[in-house]
Image (cartoon, rainbow, N blue to C red):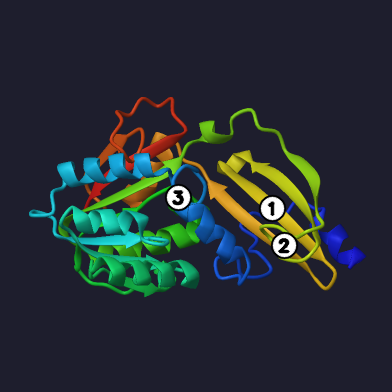
Amino acid sequence: MLNTLFQYLVRPVIYTPSTTEFWNHPHISKGMLEAHLDKNWDAASRKEEFINESVNWISTMLPSNRYPDLLDIGCGPGLYAEKFHNAGYLVTGIDFSQRSIAYAQEQSILNRSNIQYLYQNYLDMNYSESFDIVTLIYCDYGVLSSRDRSLLLDKIYKAMKPNGKLILDVFTPRQHEGKNEQKEWENNISGGFWDENPHLCLNSFYRYDEDLTVLNQTIVVSEHSTQCYNIWEHCFTEHTLINEIRNAGFGQIELFADVAGKPFNNEGTTLCTVITK
C-alpha cells in the first residue's frame, strides 16, 4: 500500500481517470443524491432559487409551444427536468448515476409528469434530430476531456432538430483565480462522504494553467484498499469556448454571464451560451 501512496504523490498526467467508479459508487452516490436534494446548498445542484430563475429564463426565451421537445443531459435526480415539465416541455433526462435516475423516476411517477429518464452515459446516446432544446447545466461540460467534449458536441448536434438550441454553462478561469496548489490530509474515523468505514483522505489541488484545467484529487485510504478519484475541470474564456463550439459545426452563439440570463460581462466565474444548430 505504501508504494501505491507514493505513486499518488506525483502530479498525474492531465485527464488521468479515477481508479474506480464515482457516480455509481454504492456509498458515494448516496452522499451525491443528498447534496442534489439540499435546496440551500450549491453542491451537486444549484440552489432551488437559482434553478427557478434558470427555468423561467429558458422558458421565456424558448417557450415550449415553439420548442416542445427538451433533452436534459446530466439531469441528476430531475430537479430541472420536473420544472421544465411544469413549464410545458416534453422532457427526456439522461444521467450516469443510477441512484439519481431511480430517484427521478420515482418522482416522475408521484408527480405524474411522464418524463422519460434514462440511465446512460451521455457519450453513448444516439439520437437523430429529436430535440428542439438540449441543456447541459452546472458546468458539466468542463469535466470532460477535450476528446470527450468533441464527441459529446457531435452527439448533441445530431440529436438536435434544425434550428434547435443548445444551452450550456462553463466555469471561467476566474473560478480558481488566486488558488494555489495544495495537499492536505483528512481523518475520517467515523466514516464520511467517500467511505462509510474509517478512512484517510489525501486531498490535492493541481493547476494545469497551460490547458486552463484544474484537478481536485482525493486519495481514499481504508483498511482494505486505496482508491484515487480525479475530478477534472476545464475552464473556458469567451474565445476558447466559441472556437470549440464553432469547430463542431454550430451556427449562432449568444453569450450570457450565467444560465439565468445575466448579461455577459467577461468578469464572472461562469459563462453561459445559447447555441443554434
Discs 3, 2 touching: Cβ within 8 Å: no
Q: Which residue is mark 2?
A: 228
**Quadrant in the picture for the C terminus:** bottom left
Q: Secondary structure at mark 1?
A: strand
Q: Residue furthest left?
A: 65
Q: Secondary structure at mark 2?
A: strand
Residue 271 image-quadrant placement: top left
Discs 2, 1 touching: Cβ within 8 Å: yes
Q: Is residue 249 visible?
A: no
Of tags 3 and 1, the one toward the viewer is: 3
Task: Give x and y (percent) for residue 159.
Answer: 25, 66
Q: Which residue is mark 3?
A: 45
Task: Give x and y (percent) for residue 244.
Answer: 39, 48
User: Along the line of sight, which residue is nearer the eye, 116 or 196?
Assistant: 196
Within 10 angstroms of label 1, few (less than 14), some, or many (20 or more) residues? many
Left/right placement of residue 210 relative to residue 257 reads right
Q: Is residue 68 visible?
A: yes
Residue 211 image-quadrant placement: top right
Q: Which residue is mark 1?
A: 217
Q: Amino acid at mark 3?
A: Ser
Q: Amino acid at mark 1?
A: Gln
Left/right placement of residue 37 relative to residue 90 reads right
Within 10 angstroms of label 2, few (less than 14), some, or many (20 or more) residues? many
Task: Give x and y (percent) for residue 1.
Answer: 89, 68
